[in-house]
Image: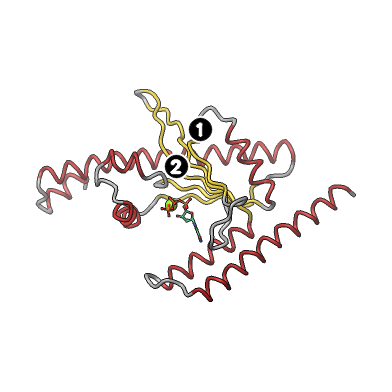
């Protein structure tokens, strides 16, 4: 059953039906962008392994923002509930997270992405050199990726987060704790404890880089 038939069966008003159909087409562009970015990154990874028998990538995750999460963000940011409003204000409908082994690999990947003609880097948020008050570290890129369609090419926004395994351990676990506490704000004591964990994670990164450098010099 196609979407129009489903909507008809629910007796949706014609205007409402059109909005949903347009939105469905709109979101498809983001799904295409996700596929595009995923394959670009897989190719970079494979090329790197072929050339250097080493890859700066530990693992890569991609995700589409869920409709619920998109709705929450629209409300939180006071974005107009229209396709234009979403297109101009929400850049993380497509999310890519690249996890590396070492901190300098994060910037190596950033340099690789900067050189691509099919990617425009719109904004860089360097939370590695400027961590968040929580202790959160990561390099965030707001990009536009090129999609070649039958009518020509279009540029679709996405958020790429690049960070080390240790940064990812902190971010993922802290996020889970925030979520568990839900609407309740974490107490200052807990925030302080978490900040300690962030510092410990950073020390792991430093130590691992030192060990690698020693091996490389020997
Ligand atoms: P959002 O409205 O949440 O997207 O924030 P923003 O538009 O100001 O962007 P920012 O780059 O600050 O954060 C984007 C994403 O980074 C968030 O959605 C989280 O996934 C992640 N993030 C940012 N700060 C933290 C933090 O303190 N802890 C954790 N665990 N994740 C964070
Ligand atoms: Mg976000």
Q: Secondary structure at mark 2?
A: strand
Name the colour scheme. Answer: secondary structure
Q: Secondary structure at mark 1?
A: strand
Image position, residue 83 (x, y; %): 27, 40
Who's the residue at 53% across and 75% down the image? 190
Nearer to us in this view, 9 or 40: 40
Distance CA(mark 2)–CA(mark 1): 10 Å
Nearer to us in this view, 27 or 198: 198
For the residue carrying disc 2, how many other residues have a C-alpha within 10 Å: few (<14), some (14-19), or many (20+)? many
**Label 2 lies in ligand 2 vicinity (Cβ under 8 Å):** no
The dot on residue 92 is: none
Who's the residue at 41% across and 49% down the image? 64
Would residue 161 appear left or right of 105 to someone viewing this image? left
For the residue carrying disc 1, how many other residues have a C-alpha within 10 Å: few (<14), some (14-19), or many (20+)? some
Would residue 23 appear left or right of 112 to someone viewing this image? left
**Label 1 lies in ligand 1 vicinity (Cβ under 8 Å):** no
Image position, residue 25 (x, y; %): 28, 39
Who's the residue at 71% across and 62% down the image? 204
**Residue under label 2:** 158
The dot on residue 119 is: 1
Image position, residue 61 (x, y; %): 52, 51
Who's the residue at 39% across and 52% down the image? 65
Image position, residue 10 (x, y; %): 12, 54
Would residue 209 appear left or right of 82 to someone viewing this image? right
């Amino acid at each position: 059953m196609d979407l129009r038939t489903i909507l008809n069966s629910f007796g949706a008003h014609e205007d409402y039906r059109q909005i949903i159909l347009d939105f469905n087409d709109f979101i498809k562009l983001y799904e295409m962008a996700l596929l595009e970015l995923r394959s670009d990154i897989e190719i970079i990874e494979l090329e790197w392994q072929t050339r250097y028998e080493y890859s700066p990538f530990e693992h890569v995750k991609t995700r589409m923002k869920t409709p619920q999460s998109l709705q929450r963000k629209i409300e939180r940011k006071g974005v107009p509930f229209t396709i234009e409003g979403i297109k101009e204000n929400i850049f993380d409908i497509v999310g890519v997270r690249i996890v590396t082994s070492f901190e300098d690999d994060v910037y190596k990947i950033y340099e690789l992405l900067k050189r691509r003609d099919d990617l425009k880097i719109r904004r860089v948020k360097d939370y590695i050199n400027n961590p968040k008050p929580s202790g959160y570290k990561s390099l965030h890129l707001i990009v536009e990726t090129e999609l070649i369609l039958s009518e020509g090419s279009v540029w679709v926004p996405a958020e790429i987060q690049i960070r080390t395994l240790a940064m990812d351990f902190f971010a993922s676990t802290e996020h889970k704790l925030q979520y568990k506490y839900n609407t309740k704000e974490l107490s200052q004591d807990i925030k302080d404890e978490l900040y300690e964990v962030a510092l410990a994670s950073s020390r792991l990164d430093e130590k691992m880089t030192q060990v690698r450098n020693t091996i490389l010099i020997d």
